Image (cartoon, grey):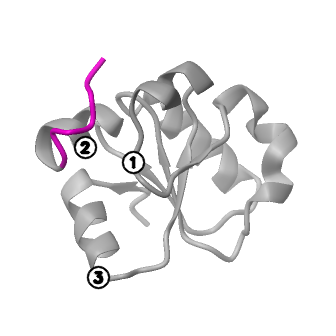
Amino acid sequence: MNHTITVRELKTRMDNGDKIFLLDVREPHEFSLAKIEGATLIPLGTLPDSLKQLNPAEEIVALCHKGMRSADATGFLLQQGFADVKNLVGGIDAWSVEIDPSVPRY
């Protein structure tokens, strides 16, 4: 199974009304600079202690600045038994460039 999703695929799925839990694993100061509407902030370092906030039956898309931390989060969640987890390729930076230029780049 492919555990990645592009920003264009995510945007299409969101526009179609698909139920996706957006998990932002950046730090609070990054989240305050730029975010995708509807995303939930759980910084990567707190993820192991925050698993109860996530529904293992839900599709989860993890995102960060460029896609590295969210790749770690995706791998971690898969190891914890979450079946439907994807990493947003390019992170919020790619979202800003390709989907929504009103989201600030940093």
Position of residue 10 in the picture relative to residue 29 (left or right): left
- The residue labelled by disc 3 is 16
Mark 1 or 2, which is nearer the eye? Answer: 1
Principal SS element in the magenta part? loop
Mark 3 or mark 1: whose residue is earlier in sequence: 3
- The residue labelled by disc 1 is 36
Mark 1 or mark 2: whose residue is earlier in sequence: 1
- Amino acid type at circle 2 is Trp
Is the residue under label 2 in contact with that under label 1 (CB below 8 Å)? yes
Mark 3 or mark 2: whose residue is earlier in sequence: 3
Position of residue 8 in the picture relative to residue 22 (left or right): left
- Within 10 angstroms of label 3, few (less than 14), some, or many (20 or more) residues? few
In terms of secondary structure, where does tag 3 sit? loop
Is the residue under label 2 in contact with that under label 3 (CB below 8 Å)? no
Q: In the rendered view, tell whether residue 55 sits above or below residue 19.
A: above
The CA span between labels 3 and 1 is 16 Å
Residue 64 in magenta stretch: no
Please report the bounds of the magenta region as a residue range: 100-106
Image coordinates for residue 102, horizontal then vertical, percent? 20, 39
The CA span between labels 1 and 2 is 8 Å
The answer to which quarter of the image holds residue 55 is bottom right
Foreground: 90 or 83? Answer: 90
The answer to which quarter of the image holds residue 18 is bottom left
Image coordinates for residue 52, horizontal then vertical, percent? 85, 57
In terms of secondary structure, where does tag 2 sit? helix
Q: Residue placed at 42% from the left, 25% from the top?
A: 33
Q: Quadrant of the C terminus?
A: top left
Q: Residue placed at 77% from the left, 54% from the top?
A: 80
- Amino acid type at circle 3 is Asn
Image coordinates for residue 20, horizontal then vertical, percent? 49, 70
Image coordinates for residue 50, horizontal then vertical, percent? 81, 45
Q: In the rendered view, tell whether residue 83 sits above or below residue 89.
A: below
